[in-house]
Amino acid sequence: MALFTGRFSSAQDFSAWEKNTFIWHQSSLPYRLLVPAADLSKKYPLVIFLHGAFEKGDDNEKQLNIGGLFFLRDSIRKNYPAYVLFPQCPEDDSWAYFENKLDLTTGKATDWNFPFAKYPTPVVSLLKKLIDSFAASGKIAVDKIYIAGLSQGGMGVLDLSARYPETFAAGIAMCGAGEPMTAKLFAGKVALWLFHGDKDPVVPVDFSRDFYRRLKKNNANVRYSEYKGVEHNCWTNAFAEPELMRWLFDQGKK
C-alpha cells in the first residue's frame, strides 16, 4: 500500500489539546481532545478529524501536525465552539480498507481497490466506541457529530459515513477516495463537502468527482471544491475556505 500526505514539521504549542488514551478490553486508541472555550454546562458539537498516513503512530503528537492549529484559532474556537477529537491510527492499521499497487516507473499508485468489508478496520471499531462514549456523556449535541479527514483520513470519512450514516450529520473529505458505490448508503443522510486538487499525483481526483456525481444523482446534500493546479495538499485550500465551518455547523440530524 502506498503511504501518503506530505510531511509537516512544527514546534507549535499544542498544550491546549488534552492528551488521552481510550482503552477497550486489550486495545487502546491514543487521541487528543480540544474542549470548547465556552460554557461547559451546555452541549456542543463533536468534530472528529482523521489524519493521513504520515501521522500514524503511537506518540499521540503527530496527528495534530495538519489541522491542529486550524482548530486552535481564536476565531474558530469563539464562533464554532465544539469538542474536537484527533485520534491517532497505529502504523499497522488504517481508517479504511484499501489496496493498490505502486508503479515503479511513475511512482504513482495504481489498481485501486476499496473492499467494503462487513466489519470496519480494528482502529475504526475502537474509534466508533469512543465516539459512542462521547455521545453518551451528556456533553455532546448528538445531532451535530461531524467527521473530517485528509488523504487516508479522507478515505476514512467516506468509509465511516457509509457504515454509520445514523451517527454523522456531515463529513469533510479532503483528497480522499473510496468505493463510489457506497455513496448510496449515506446519500441524503450525511451531508458531505469534498475537496481535491486536479493535479493530485497521489490520490486520483476521479474518486472525488465520482462520489460527487453519484451523490448529486441521489439528491444528496453535497458540495465539491476542486482546485486547479493543486496537487495532494488540497487541505491548505480547504482550511482557507471562508464558508467551511459555517457550512459544517449548519448541518444537523433531523
Image: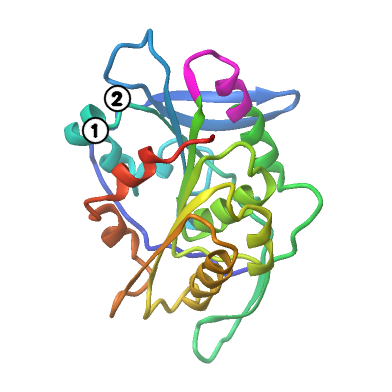
Q: Residue furthest top?
A: 41
Corner quadrant of residue 74: top left
Residue 133 counted in the magenta span:
yes
Residue labelled with disc 2: 16
Task: Find residue 64 and report its horizontal and vertical position in percent.
Answer: 37, 41
Q: Can you say which quadrant of the picture contains the N terminus?
A: bottom right
Residue farthest to the right, as pictured: 118
**Amino acid type assigned to the residue bearing label 2 in the image:** Ala
Can residue 33 be found in the magenta stretch?
no
Q: Residue at x 49, y 45 (%)?
A: 170
Mark 2, other Cα within 10 Å: few <14 / some 14–19 / many ≥20: few
Q: Position of residue 5 (x, y in %)?
A: 42, 62
Chain part drawn in magenta:
131-141
Helix, strand or loop under label 1 = loop
Front in this rendered view, residue 127 or 219: 219
Report if residue 148 is visible in the image. yes
Q: Is residue 92 visible?
A: no
**Which residue is located at x 50 percent, y 57 percent?**
154
